[in-house]
C-alpha cells in the first residue's frame, strides 16, 4: 500500500512536466488569451481523481501551473479515470483528447476545450525536450 503523503506515479510525472512548463515561455504562452487586443492570463483549476492515486489538483494562475495534493472543491475541471492514461500523456504517448475519446479519462465537470489547452502546454514541454 502506498504511503498517504507519497505522490502517485501520474501525479509525480505531471508535477515534473509542470515544473518544466513554468520555465518555458512558449508553454506558458498557452495560458494567455488575447481579448479585444488585450492579453488576459488564463486562470483555471483541474481536479484529478484517478484510479490508484490519491486526489490532486493543478491550478494555473499568472502563467504558472502548480500541483497540490488533495481535493479542490471549487475546481472548474474535474477529471477521473485511469492514472496510466495520464502517465502516457506525460510521456508523450498520447493526449487528453485521445484518452477522453477512449474513455480512459472522463471529464466529470467543465469544458473539454479547457483540458485541451492543458494538453497544448504539455505538448510544448515535450517538444522542448527533443
Image (tube, rainbow, N blue to C red):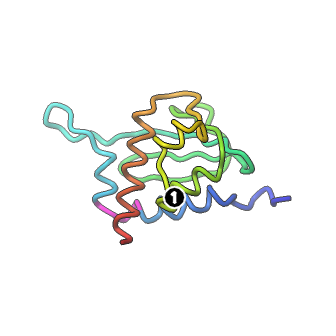
19 w.r.t. 28: above or below:
below
Q: Residues within 10 Å of mark 1 (few under 14, many from 20)?
A: many
Is residue 84 in the magenta section? no
Q: Residue at x 40, y 39 (%)?
A: 43
Q: Nearer the viewer, residue 95 or 56?
A: 95
Quadrant of the rendered image containing residue 13:
bottom right
**As drawn, which residue projects farthest toward the front?**
102
* Residue wearing tag 1: 90
Q: Residue at x 28, y 44 (%)?
A: 32
Q: Position of residue 80 (x, y in %)?
A: 64, 38
On screen, residue 39 versus residue 103, left or right, reads left
The quadrant the N terminus occupies is bottom right
5 w.r.t. 40: above or below:
below
On screen, residue 124 versus residue 51, left or right, reads left
**As drawn, which residue projects farthest toward the left?**
37
Q: Residue at x 72, y 50 (%)?
A: 53
Q: Nearer the viewer, residue 71 or 108?
A: 108
On screen, residue 32 versus residue 53, left or right, reads left
Q: Residue at x 61, y 61 (%)?
A: 12
Q: Position of residue 124 (x, y in %)?
A: 35, 58
SS at circle 1: helix
In magenta, the rendered stretch is 21-25
Q: Position of residue 68 (x, y in %)?
A: 60, 51
Amino acid at each position: 500500500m502506498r504511503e498517504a503523503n507519497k505522490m502517485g506515479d501520474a501525479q509525480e510525472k505531471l508535477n515534473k512536466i509542470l515544473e518544466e512548463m513554468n520555465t518555458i515561455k512558449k508553454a506558458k504562452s498557452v495560458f494567455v488569451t488575447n481579448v479585444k487586443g488585450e492579453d488576459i492570463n488564463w486562470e483555471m483549476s483541474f481536479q484529478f481523481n484517478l484510479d490508484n492515486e490519491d486526489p490532486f489538483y493543478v491550478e494555473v494562475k499568472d502563467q504558472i501551473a502548480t500541483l497540490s495534493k488533495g481535493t479542490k472543491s471549487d475546481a472548474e475541471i474535474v477529471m477521473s479515470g485511469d492514472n496510466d492514461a495520464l502517465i502516457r500523456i506525460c510521456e508523450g504517448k498520447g493526449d487528453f483528447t485521445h484518452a477522453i475519446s477512449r474513455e480512459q479519462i472522463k471529464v466529470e465537470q467543465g469544458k473539454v476545450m479547457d483540458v485541451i489547452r492543458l494538453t497544448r502546454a504539455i505538448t510544448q514541454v515535450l517538444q522542448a525536450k527533443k
